[in-house]
């Protein structure tokens, strides 16, 4: 696993370029994605032994403990938006736990899928320990039906998650689902406004807006709303759009023309629900799947589009009059992946931590994944966790071991 980390670090420019060419993320982001993959490999290389060490438990037994054992081949169905990171954050813990990884990657990133298989091969993993299956989604069922495949993890949309989980459920195979999000980003009056705004723009436009944990709904206290709106719009307008292979580009093209079509429909829907476009609001008149960074206000918060996942650089702003209203609006979505709240008031921080319905709450920061912290959602954002010790324990047999004193002739008690 350390050797895989070295390969990723040494060749991050080539891997970065591959990601950019296949799905359009900026080269800067792609190269740092390769670095992050090296980080997760190192993290599990260094910590797996401790995460999976026997855990002694005091009972009436002479000795009892929990042992973690591998379960076997696990199928990973992965999305294109972080074509390396999504795979490595599954593969590093799964392989360190002694499992086999089978990757069905998104159909638009086959070269990334093959490059990842090659990294593990070159790193010296046994033949077949990590395999890329170049198959369409219609073939997932037949792989999952195979008795040798014991579990599955899917990162992607709700329909895909629901389909894979039902196929697996019918055969009593465990699943982990990492699905979509409509993360709130809340700004209260005591926040450092300038910092909050700059972070908000980054949180919305990261990966050209195509991230499950991108902030999608900006919920701002009335006292600071006007200032927030003005500066947020100005910063969205100032983003440098261009060729994703240029170092200075901040917003590249979206991954497919279908995503631009979907985005266009959602923005039209938002406008039909009372929304006003403050900047952007249309595709760019240039070759490639470019959509302008867009800010919408006045969208009816009860309209479905206000809390759907919007996968592109489109932000919606909402003005609220109290923390109660902020929390109510933040939770008014079927999703529950990440959430961010900006406030320097300790009592408010505590309320957000307790009351936001999400797998993560970031106070005075933007939601991000980190190998040391668990990652996952609640509600329609899925179940199970990746990363940290929680991630490596998803695909292991948590075996209870109970050792009693045995005399020569024993009673047959259960
Ligand atoms: P997607 O259409 O669901 O595709 C994801 C993967 O599932 C692809 O490999 C796809 O294969 C496969 N797939 C699609 N339908 C399937 C089905 N019925 N049965 C089996 N496999 C199926 O999602 P996407 O558009 O690529 O990715 C964006 C979504 O992923 C967003 O909703 C985003 O929020 C979510 N996401 C979540 C996380 C998280 O950690 N929670 C992270 C990143 C992204 P094909 O490409 O061959 O169709």
Image: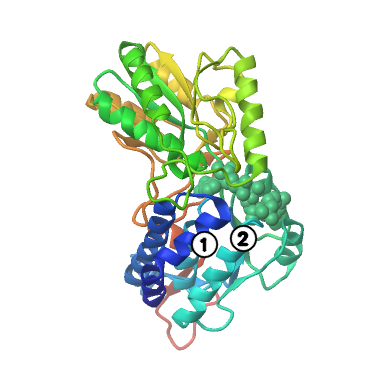
Q: Position of residue 201 (x, y in %)?
A: 39, 32
**Looking at the image, which residue is at 59% across and 12% down?**
274
Q: Quadrant of the N terminus?
A: bottom left
The answer to which of 249 and 152 lies nearer the viewer is: 249
Does label 1 or label 2 sit earlier along the sequence?
1
**What residue do we see at 49% from left, 86% from top?**
409
Q: Residue at x 41, y 37 (%)?
A: 240
Q: Is residue 15 visible?
A: yes
Asked if one can make out residue 340 in the rendered structure from this viewpoint, the answer is no
Q: Label 1: how many residues lie within 10 Å, few (<14), some (14-19) or many (20+)?
A: many
User: Looking at this view, is 403 or 223 the one in front?
Assistant: 223
Q: Is mark 2 within 8 Å of ligand 1?
A: yes
- Give the quarter of the figure containing the C terminus: bottom right
Label 2 environment density (alpha carbons within 10 Å; few <14, some 14–19, many ≥20): many
Q: Which residue is mark 2?
A: 105
Left or right of residue 404: residue 262: right
Q: Position of residue 39 (x, y in %)?
A: 35, 63
Closer to us: 160 or 244: 244
Check disc 1 and report its element: helix, strand or loop: helix
Label 1 or label 2, whichever lies nearer to me, is: 1
Question: Element under label 2?
Answer: loop
| Total number of numbered discs in the rendering | 2
In the rendered structure, find residue 359 and report the number of the disc placed on it: none
Q: Which residue is painted at 64% across and 15% down in the image?
A: 272
Residue 151 % position (x, y) = 61, 63
Distance between the alpha carbons at the discs numbered 1 and 2: 15 Å
Q: How is the image coloured?
A: rainbow
Asked if residue 326 is positioned above or below residue 23 in the image, the reply reads above
Q: Which label number is shown at residue 18?
A: 1
Percent position of residue 266, x then y: 63, 27
């Amino acid at each position: 696993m350390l050797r895989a980390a070295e390969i990723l670090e040494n060749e991050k420019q080539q891997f970065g370029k591959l990601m950019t060419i296949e799905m359009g993320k900026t080269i800067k982001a792609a190269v740092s994605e390769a670095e992050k993959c090296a980080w997760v490999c190192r993290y599990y290389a260094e910590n797996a032994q401790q995460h999976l060490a026997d855990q002694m438990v005091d009972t009436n037994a002479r000795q009892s403990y929990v042992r973690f054992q591998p379960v076997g081949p696990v199928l990973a169905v992965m999305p294109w938006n972080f074509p390396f990171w999504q795979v490595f954050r599954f593969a590093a813990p799964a392989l360190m736990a002694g499992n086999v990884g089978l990757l069905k990657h998104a159909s638009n990133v086959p070269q990334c899928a093959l490059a990842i298989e090659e990294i593990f091969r070159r790193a010296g993993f046994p033949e077949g320990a990590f395999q890329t299956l170049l198959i369409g989604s219609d073939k997932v069922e037949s792989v999952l039906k195979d008795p040798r495949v014991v579990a599955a993890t899917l990162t992607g949309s709700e329909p895909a998650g629901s389909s894979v989980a039902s196929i697996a459920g019918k055969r009593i195979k465990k699943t982990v689902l990492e699905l979509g999000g409509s993360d709130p980003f809340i700004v209260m009056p005591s926040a450092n406004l300038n910092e909050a705004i700059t972070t908000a723009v980054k949180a919305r436009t990261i990966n050209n807006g195509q991230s499950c944990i991108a902030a999608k709904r900006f919920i701002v206290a009335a006292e600071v709303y006007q200032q927030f709106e003005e500066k947020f719009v100005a910063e969205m307008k100032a983003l440098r759009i261009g060729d994703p292979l240029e170092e200075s580009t901040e917003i590249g093209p979206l991954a497919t023309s279908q995503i631009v079509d979907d985005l266009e429909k959602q923005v039209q829907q938002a406008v039909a629900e009372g929304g006003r476009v403050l900047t952007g609001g249309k595709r760019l008149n240039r070759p490639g799947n470019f959509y302008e960074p867009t800010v919408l206000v006045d969208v009816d918060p009860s309209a479905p589009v206000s809390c759907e996942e919007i996968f592109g650089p489109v932000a919606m702003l909402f003005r609220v009059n109290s923390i109660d209203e902020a929390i109510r609006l933040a939770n008014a979505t079927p999703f529950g992946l990440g959430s961010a709240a900006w406030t320097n008031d300790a009592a408010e921080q505590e309320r957000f931590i307790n009351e936001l319905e999400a797998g993560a709450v970031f106070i005075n920061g933007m939601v991000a994944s980190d190998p040391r912290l668990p990652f996952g959602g609640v509600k329609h954002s899925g179940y199970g966790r990746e990363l940290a010790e929680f991630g490596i324990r998803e695909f292991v047999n948590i075996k209870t071991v109970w050792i009693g004193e045995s005399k020569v002739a024993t009673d047959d008690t259960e």
